[in-house]
Structure formats: structure tokens, C-alpha cells
Amino acid sequence: MDDEHPPPAQVPADEDDPQSSGDEDDGGLDWTNLPGVARPVIPKRGEKDFEPKAGGGSGLQIHVLDSARSAMFDTLRTTRTISSKAISYAVWYPNLGRTHVTLAKGIHFSAMGHSAPRPVVDENGFEKIQKRLELLPEETIHLVERGSLFCWKDTGMDLTKMQTEMSGAPMTVQQVYAEMLGVEDLTLERLQVYTYLKRLGYSVMRTNPPTPYYPTPPPWPSQNSQVATSSSSHSVLRRMFSSFSVWIYNIFSKPFDWWQPLRMSRWLHHDKNYGHKVALHHPDIIKRLEMKNNSPYQIFYNLYKPSTPIKRSAPPLPDFQVVVINARTTPMPTLQELTDLFDVLPELPPPLPRIRRPLPVLTATPPPASAVAASLPVHPTFKSSSQPPAVQNKLLFIQRLFPWAFSLTQPTEPIRRPHPFMALKAGKKLIVIAVVDSGSISFFRFGQGEFTEWPMA
Amino acid sequence: MSMITPSSRGKGSLKGGARKNENNRIYAFPLPLLFVEPPSRLRSVLGLLGLSLTEVVNPHCEGVFDPITRSVWVTGARDTMLLWQRGFFGKGDLSRSEPSWLARQINIRKAGGKQITSEEVTAKRRAERRQFKLDRAAAIAAVAAEAEAIFEAEGRVIKPALSGPGIPSAATWRPSSSLTKISATPSPEEDVEPAELEPLVDVEHLQLTLQEAFFLAWGLDCLTVLDPHTNEAMTLKQLWTVFQVAHLPPSIPPNPAPPLQFDNPFLINYVIYHHYRSLGWVVKGGIKFCVDYLLYKRGPVFTHAEFAMVVCPVYEDIEDQKASSLELQNTTPFAWSWLSTINRVNSQVQKTLILVYVTIPARSRLSPSILDSPACLEHYSVREVTLRRFIPARMRD
């Protein structure tokens, strides 16, 4: 089951955008919120009947269907307008693959566009480097399509002597599409994903900067710093004790006999460590590198939730990272491709349960049994359920002899521990793959599972 | 629900908490082996030193290998019950899961069936649900007809409601008396001729898959498998070889020791079975939901399965795949439409889909003689990838 999410809050229709959709995308546009020159009276569409009555539908069904259909067509037929105070102007340079925004209006540019240094010939004929606002092709197409941008094509002619700044008519939507698709790694699928997510309110930026001055988020914090290496006496003694006991075990045990894997030993056991930590073998290294570079599974977009404030020049760490592929031509990712994707992603903490007011939830699950002082270690690890959860396992042998030497801090507030099922479902690393099938986009979250961290015994 | 163990009150009459306690009592042991603890004072003293004197009680069950069905049959009633109740191993071949054929036959013979098996509960529930859907459809049709009449008479448009006070919903509908009468009528006929029936012989057996049988025999050492022709106990080495050969295509002339392969389905499935069993999950077959395995936290009687696993074997060396005589499923990454299908089927039943990638070691790296013993298992690796849908409209906050 998809995670239990609270139902989406109603996004208020923005007065500046004439084409914002006020409803969640699954229900279709709410036609009552769209302005029109002559606003037609639109009845709200109800639930579908299961099937029309025999003989082509009853009178009531035909009437309701006709009124809903005509309302939709009327709304589509109205001319879309935008206030002249809200429109922006830009010029498209095909050789650069960017549009230069000469006049920026509206709220879009807080999260769109980047500043690029370009040589400019000033009045004295000297070339200086000036920074100007530029847009990527997908950003341009998106803005032109929603009607908030007029875009002209750069003719290369020198216009400083002429009266008007721009010449000719602005590019039509069809021309914008024709010119900009295929430029700078933009395919139709990627554009569709971009416009879909932008319309929902997300901020979308590219992961691999196409030029050096494209803003990139800081690199992910390295994994080593996240491992708590506390040098308190507690952990030092524990590590000493565990290595000592492993050494003793190795002295007294026979080498592992594969025909008798189960030994009722009274000492300690080893942890299994196969799984994601073991590297994948590949017979041919060169071929593997070549396949890695040519694979369609490369992260393309960084996604930020609408509530995250974005500074255009220094974007924060992305909330999600998206790979865009075509459903018809690209099959599912192979294990190698998934591993390559996961290698660059950070590990996520397990999800905590939602806060339920007024009582805080304490989803206490017995933590995975520690290797030290387990009362019945067996080679494949399991315990019978008749044993009570052994809290005293956590106290070391030395600590039990001298309890006054070690002060154990009691937690002052109830601990919110993650539920094992939630943690297992979320996985440790997350990649979003957008599968585009002729315009229909399905998003899948592939997570790197780690069942060995949450044993059920 | 266990039918064979006699209890003073029928299982069907227990509700809620009492049934949970009953289940906890019957299915208290997660494995066929029992660990008997010494007295608690001695235990705590030894616990300080990290020792224990726990004894292990081994039930020593027996089963017969059947090469045609590629399974191990357990026929003794004590062994069957033991293996099912301690760890949910196997499946009764005439029942849904727990071997309950005998109990159902007894119920059919006796009037009024005091103990209801799970198959009968399912049949009853399906009949009730069908009746509920008919009632609901009739109510919705009545409301729609009413709205239609109003529209024709006055021109006023009312949306016919699909839920509301007049229409039964799943929470408010109650089975009508006609259903209960139908189930009661067969009983008077049975009472007429009780003397002519033969005594019942239990013809059902418990069927263990090869992976379960090998786990019990090798991992836990509590099952002995007999050869079907000679009725002798097979050694572990024989079991290991025979289980693998069962999956290989037969050769002509018949070769008792055919060359073993790394991509034998028995090996791949055994790696997964052993991995998840040793993590504490109960692993059962998942053919009902288009997947390979289902993982239960404690067992099927407690909660529904939480995870549905699809096994995707991955060859380390692509040449091995081309040269192999076996064709494994899901080795080539499947199409998005199939993945969406499985995902949707499992989302409907509130399970999370997990793709389990098992890497098959390359023949260039290891010699095939390693396959003669379970030592080859350490060269397989198991990785999981969880799969869920991402709905941007809902993930905005």
C-alpha cells in the first residue's frame, strides 16, 4: 500500500497566474477557479455513473453529461489573458542554447533561471563580462506555454541603432517547442516531467550542471561523519570486550563445517555480512565502465518540495532526485544500474512515526539483539519467542560488577523509535524514477532495502 | 486456527482477544526445536558470564522425497502438526494452508459443525459479500431511478447518491436471515444415516517445498528425508545433490550424476529462504499475488503478510546465461507495464513489493566442484530493493 499520507491541502489559486490549477492533479482541473473573459457558469462535475442505461443513457444521464462537456469546452475556448505588468520578455540564442531574460516579472524567477556571465560590448567598444539572467530550454518552454513569457529569437542583427529593442513577432509556442527540444539534453519526456512537477509547485533544477556557472547544491555529507564515534568509556570498553570475546571464540572453535552449520555453542556468534555491502563482481571492468556511462539511468533532476525556500545561487540539498526514462524503449533498471545510482545517494534515517497529539507515541520495539552476552547464540541467529526481551543484554559484564563506576543517562522524554515495517518499506536510500509513456508519467520510488538491520527475531 | 488439537470450546466461538491468546498458546514456538531453560536462579548467574545451560529438544520428524512433485511429503499426524504449528512449514495438499481436510470431513458429517475451518470461513464470507453487493446494487439502482423520475417530471437535476442513508455500506449491512436458513437445511438429512458411513482415514499429507525441507534437515537438523524407493534415510550430501538434480532437465540416457550448475533454481531459492528465515521472518509462497514469496512477521494466522518478494536472479557473467540449459524467470529486467501490474496488485492488498536480486557467481570465478557442498552458498549475495509509488501531488508537504 502506498504510505498513508494526509489528504492534500487545497492550494489557494494564485491571483497572478491565470492558469494555476487549484485542485490536486488527480481530480483534474477545477474549472470553476479559472478566470475567463466571459465567465460561463460551470456546474461541478460529479461522480461517474457505472454505465449508461440501456439504449444510450437515460435522460438525466445525457443531460448531466452534456452540461459538463459543454462547460469544459467553453472554458477552453476563452481567450487567455495576462496583465501587461506581469509579462516577462526574453531572447533565445540558438548557438548558446539559452534564453536571456531582458525583463523579468512575476514570482517565477525566484526559483528559475541562473545568472551567467557573458561578454558584452559596451558603449566604448570594450568587451566586459556582465552577468545576466538566463533560462534553460525547459524553463523557457514552460514559461512560454503558460503565457507568462514573450520570447524572441535572436537574429544576430545589430539592433542598437534601431528604435525598437526587439524586432518582429515573438516566437509561437510551436516554434519554441521545435527550437528547444533536443537542445542541451532536453527530450520530450524530460520536458513533460519538468512541466508536470513545476505545475504542482515543486522547484526543479538539473543535477549535472550543463555549464560551470550553473548553481549546484553542496555535496552530500560524507557517511563517515554520521557514524557516531563517541570516545566515552562505555563504547571503548564494549569494543574491547567484543574483540576479546571474538578472539577467545576463534581459539576454541573448529573451522566452520558446512555440513553442520548449526552448532549449539555457548559462546558468541558472528554477524552475517553479505548483501549491499559486498561489491558486485563483474568479469570485464572496461565493459562495465562503458555500460555505466551509456546507461539511460542517470540522475537528471533535483527536486525540492514547494515549502523549501530556494536561494537561486546556492540551492540547498535536494529533497528528491529524479531519473527520467521512456517506458517504451528502456526496460527496468538492472542491478548494476541500481547500484550505480545508489552509490551516489546518501543514506536516509529511518522514518519516525507521526506525532499524535496529545499523547506522544512510543512505538517500542526491542532493538536488534547485540552480539555481546546473548544468552543463546546459534550460528543462524534466532531466539525463541518465549524469552523475554533481554534488556539486561545492554549492560556489560564489567558494568554489572561495578555499577557505581558508570553513569547511565535515563532518557527524559519518551523516545520515538521507528517502526520496523516503516523503516523496511522506506529503505536506506531513495531514488525516484519517472517513467514516461507517451505523456503519462508514473513515478516509482526505488529504495535500497536493508532487511538485515531489522531482524524479526 | 488449529482443528486437530481438541479444545473444550470450538475455535469459531472465540472472539478477539480470546482467539489471540489461543493462537499465542498454540503457535508459541517459532521453530520445531525447543529450548528448555534451566531454573531461573542458575540462569541469571550463568548469564553474567555469558553462558547458558539451555537444552535443545529435537522432535526428529520424518518425510519422504517425491521427485515428481519436487517436494517432501510428511504423513505422520504428529509430525505434520508439529511442523505446521512451530514455524508454519509446509502446506496441506488438500487444504488452503494448514492441513485441515480431516477436520472438514468431520464437520460435514457432524450436524452443525462446532469447529469451523478456515476454508469454510472463507466460503461463508464470500457468499455474504456477494449478497451485500447485490443489495447495494439494487439500492443504488432504486435511487437512480428516483432521480430519473424527478428529472423527467420537473426538469430538476439531482445527483443520484452512491452512498448515504438509504444505501447499504460494508459497515452497516447485515446478512439477512435467508442465508442462515440455507446453511442449516442440509443437517437434518445427515442425521438420517449415520451408521452407514465408513470410518475416516486421513488421506492428506503435509507438503514441504525442497527449500523448506533442506532448511529443516540441514539448518535445524530436525527432519529426516527418506528415499521413496528404498525407504532409507538420505544423508545430507545425498539430499543436497538430489534436490539440485530434481530441477535439472532429465538427460537421455539417464545420468545419476549430471553436472551441477550455479543457476539451479533450488540454489537460488534456497539462498533467499535461508536468508529470510534466519532473520526471523516466516517465508511462504506468493503465487496468489503474482510474486514469488511472502514474508510474514510471526505467521499467517497472526497478521497478513507485509512484504511480497519477487526474485530477480542476476548473472555475474552474461556468458553464463547464454550457455545455460535452464531458463530462469525474471533474469532479464521486465517491462514497466508488468512491474506496474505487480505493484498495483500488491498495493491493493496492502503489501509492499520488494525486488530481491540474487547474484549468481560466474563460472569463470569458481570451479563447479564447489557445488557439491553447501559451501557454494557463501558466494551468492542477496540484495533488496523496495518499490513504492511516488505521487507528487501528495508528497508536497
Image (spheres, coloured by chain):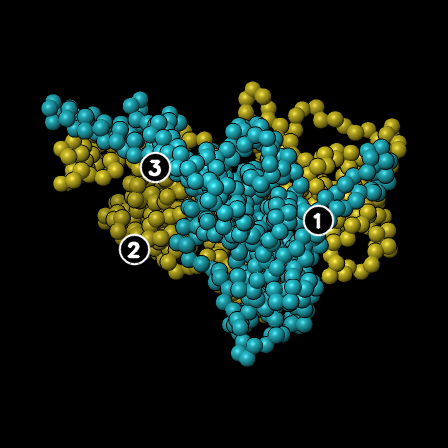
Chain colours: A yellow, B cyan
Residue B379: x, y in percent? 66, 62
Label 2 and label 3: CA atoms lie apart by 56 Å
In which quadrant of the rendered view does residue B299 lie? top right
**Lateral position of residue B345 relative to residue B142, left or right:** right
Closest to the camera, between mark 2 and mark 3, is 3
Judging from the image, mark 3 belongs to the subunit labelled: B
Query: Which mark is drawn over residue A178?
Result: 2
Residue drawn at the location 42% of the way across and 57% of the way down: B335
Residue B357 lies, with reference to residue B388, above or below; the image says below
Q: Residue furthest right?
A: A402
Residue A4 lies, with reference to residue B219, above or below; the image says above
Q: Residues within 10 Å of mark 1 (few under 14, many from 20)?
A: some
Label 1 and label 2: CA atoms lie apart by 75 Å
Looking at the image, is mark 3 or mark 1 earlier in the sequence? 1
Q: Residues within 10 Å of mark 3 (few under 14, many from 20)?
A: few
Q: Secondary structure at mark 3?
A: helix
Q: Secondary structure at mark 1?
A: loop
**Lateral position of residue A90 relative to residue B116, left or right:** left
Label 3–label 1 contact, CB within 8 A: no
Q: Quadrant of the N terminus of chain B?
A: top right
Residue B178: x, y in percent? 33, 30
Query: Front-most of A217 and B21?
Result: B21
Query: Front-most of A419 and B44?
Result: B44
Q: Give the labeled residue for mark 1.
A: B59
Q: Is residue B367 visible?
A: yes
Query: Which mark is drawn over residue B130?
Result: 3
Amino acid identity at mark 1: Pro
Q: Residues within 10 Å of mark 2 (few under 14, many from 20)?
A: few
Query: Front-most of B258 and B157?
Result: B258
Amino acid identity at mark 3: Arg
